[in-house]
Each structure stands twice: as structure tokens, then as C-alpha cells.
Image (cartoon, rainbow, N blue to C red):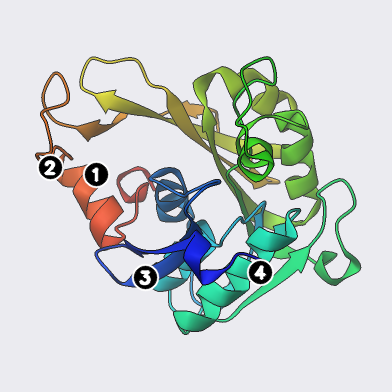
Amino acid sequence: MFTDAELTDDKFLCGRLQLLQPVKGYRAATDPVLLAAACPALAGDRVLDIGCGAGAASLCLGARVPGAQLWGLEVQPVYADLARRNAARNGLAMQVHDGDLSQIPAALRMDFDHVIMNPPYYPPAGTPSPLPERARAMQVDLPLGDWVQAGARRLAPRGWLTLICGTDGLPDVLRGMSKLGSIAVLPLAPRAGRMAQRIIVQARKGGRAPFRLLAPFVLHTGLAHDGDRETYTPEASAVLRNGSDLLARFR
């Protein structure tokens, strides 16, 4: 368990959430916020976050959709403990279970309306972080297709799977979607005219709509980083600061 001295207390969604995160280790940035904003959950829906970490994605979703029923699965006990603490201190109900997606705990073997995931997507050949917890959270240990298949098994009929990963992970993600349909891919471009580095992928169990490659979502204005000045586009600011629905314009 992390001590208080090993944690920071960070604001998300303009302070609507306060999340404890390790000073050293995996720290949530924009990815879980974007993931939460892409999930089409409604009040009363069951949502499972596979690899929930300290709970950033689930709790951002809970802040945006009051009444969503939240569950989390996390392989690292120290992060699972943080997710429970973060849920409690933000007044959000979330059941977090320790375990591995290759052998999901019995308590999670139910049907969910939504499965969300922010799996590790840095290739294992890269230089790992010297911090084991951070390395495990960021570098691929199981193929992305295995993550997708594990999530699909937990979906109710017509349920939605939503994930965020690096663009180079798309072929593996699609290979894992043999049981899913209505696939949509949203490229996340750092700036207009720049190549997307990350993508949101969404699919439906039993979906029959054609594959869609959506127009890129641009995160920053300008051609390059401009010191400490805020550079989010208005659309990105609405999502990252106010919790707006990322895919509303495509539904």
C-alpha cells in the first residue's frame, strides 16, 4: 500500500474529481478521461473497467453519468487499493476486485452493459520503466486481442466495448473482435494535420452496423507546443475539463 508521502492529490474534470496517485509509478493523464468520455453508458448501466488502475476512467465516467454502476478489475493490489480509496473519497460507489483478466474473479462473471479498458500498449521491446508497477501498467504483457476477447466475454448481448490504445495496436485489437460488430475507430490527433498517436475503438456485441473510421479528434491548437499556455481545442477542453461526451456527434 502506498503511504501518504508517496501520493499526490490531483484534480480531474476541473476539480469534480480528486484522485490520489503515486508520485512514482503509473499516473493517469488524458487517456482515461478520453476513454470515460467515449463510453455511452446511461444511469443504471453496469460498467466493468478492466485494468482500472487507480480508478481514473471509471470515476470520470461516474462523475459524468450519475447512477452508472461501476466495477473494476486490477492486477496490481496497490492500485486496486487506490481505486477503492478514490471512489470512497469522491462519494462514488465502485466495486474493485484484485485479479488478472486471464482468470477473471468469480464475482465479476456476470453480464455488463459496458466494458472499458486502457490496456498497456507500449511494445515489450522498448526500455521498461525502472519502477515495476509503472512498467506493468504501460508495457504490453498480453496481446491487445486477448484483452478485447476477455472484455467481449463479459458483455451482455448488445453491450458496448470501448478502449483506448496506440494506433499501432489497431490490427491486434481488430483481430480480437470476431464476436463484436458495429466497430468505430476515432483517431486522436495531437494537432491538426499531425498523425494520430492514439485511438479510441468501440464495438458492440451482436452489432451489425458497418465499420466506421471517424474524423480525427484534435486535442491541441497551433502547430507546436507553446510554453505553459493552455492549447486545448474547445472540443478537447469540453471533454477533458467538463466531461462532455466525446462521441456525441457520431451517435
Can residue 68 be spotted in the picture? no
Badge 1 element: helix
Residue nearest the observer in this picture, 173 or 80: 80
Residue at far front of view: 5
Q: Residues within 10 Å of mark 4 (few under 14, many from 20)?
A: some
Residue 118 location, x and y as percent?
Answer: 58, 44
Which residue is denoted by mark 1 in the rendering?
236
Residue type highlighted by circle 3: Leu
Q: Quadrant of the N terminus?
A: bottom right
Label 1 environment density (alpha carbons within 10 Å; few <14, some 14–19, many ≥20): many
In this rendered view, identify the residue nearer to me: 194 or 211: 194
Question: Marks 1 and 4, how far apart in space?
Answer: 30 Å
Circle 3/circle 2 CB separation < 8 Å:
no
Residue 3 locus on image (x, y percent): 57, 68
Q: Residue type at mark 1?
A: Ala
Residue occupied by mark 4: 81
Element assignment for label 4: helix
Question: If you read the primary sequence from the N terminus, does the residue marked by circle 3 or circle 4 appear first?
Answer: 3
Query: Can you identify the residue that label 2 sits on?
Result: 230
Q: Are marks 3 and 1 in contact (CB under 8 Å)?
A: no
